Amino acid sequence: GKTITVALVGNPNCGKTTLFNYASGSKERVGNYAGVTIDAKEARFKQDDYTFVISDLPGTYSITEYSPEELFVRNQIAEKRPDVVVNVVDASNLERNLFLTTQLIDMNIKVVIALNMYDELEQKSAKLDYTHLGEMMGIPIVPTVASKGKGLKALFDRIIEVYEERDPIVRHIHINYGEEIEKSIQNIQQELKKDDQKRKKYSTRFLAIKLLEEDQHTLNLLTDSPVFEVVKQIANEETARLEKKFEDQSETLIADAKYGFIAGALKETYRNGPQVRRDQS
Ligand code: GDP
Ligand code: K
Ligand code: MG
């Protein structure tokens, strides 16, 4: 059979390690990464004809470059290139968890969302049309309760579908950053695309967005590129243009657009449960 490499990515405390242990039958206790060398725990297991090599990555709210954990996770995704990234999302904290998802969307990689803590959503009697939310993001969403092993068979079945490029939900969407930011992205991307090696290895849209965020790590990735000097200059010009026009940091503008996308998607798909009055309990 085939081997599929899978990386678990998500915020701290969303249930990654629980899912990892349950799926792989691992008895190993994976504690917090605080104070410990940052690494990825790896395990292997079979489902049907497939062997999964699954890794449990440190929890992060974002994949920028502000902490060693974030950089580690980013490199695991962008350089190690797992076949499928499982974005573990805490269903009881959607808005915050989906921020990381918007960054994965920019990276244009194969993603499946494990909508974990689904029991907590049900307890609140909240309603989420996760099929529609998945359609809007181009990412299949599978509800799971990792602590009870619920939904995990369905999750790995879905990973196979995505890996084999048979999943009808999967499509590459662009988060719309608004006319001006899109113009800037395009100008940078146009130049980046002249570098065949980089365009094969990375999503040029992701690189362009990161450059607009003045991300040093991305600049470092490009120092060996024949278009480096030109790209750097265009990125500086575009960043300055946006910051002047909107009187805000370009990184903030991009984050605002991401939260706008999430708010719009949840407005269409999420309904809060009825408020419970405290004095009744
Ligand atoms: P990680 O930081 O993402 O690795 O999260 P952990 O796997 O350490 O889980 C954090 C906590 O959430 C633990 O107490 C788990 O037992 C609990 N947990 C994990 N999955 C679920 C779930 O689906 N539902 C509920 N209610 N709790 C869960
Ligand atoms: K929790
Ligand atoms: Mg963990």
Image (spheres, rainbow, N blue to C red):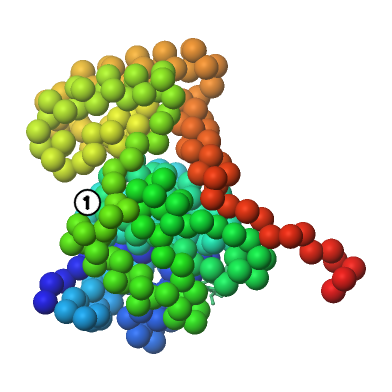
Res 28 → quadrant: bottom left
Q: Nearer the viewer, residue 105 or 28?
A: 105
Name the residue located 16 percent from the left edge and 43 percent from the top edge: 201
Q: Nearer the viewer, residue 178 or 243?
A: 178
Res 121 → quadrant: bottom right
**Amino acid at the residue labelled 1:** Glu
Q: Position of residue 237 (x, y in %)?
A: 35, 14
Q: Is residue 2 left or right of residue 68?
A: left
Q: Nearer the viewer, residue 66 or 132?
A: 132
Does any portion of residue 76 appear in the rendered image?
no
Name the residue located 23 percent from the left edge and 34 percent from the top edge: 204
Q: Is residue 194 above or below residue 271?
A: above
Q: How many labels sit on residues?
A: 1
Q: Position of residue 101 (x, y in %)?
A: 42, 49
Q: Is residue 49 above or below residue 222?
A: below
Per the image, the residue denoted by label 1 is 79
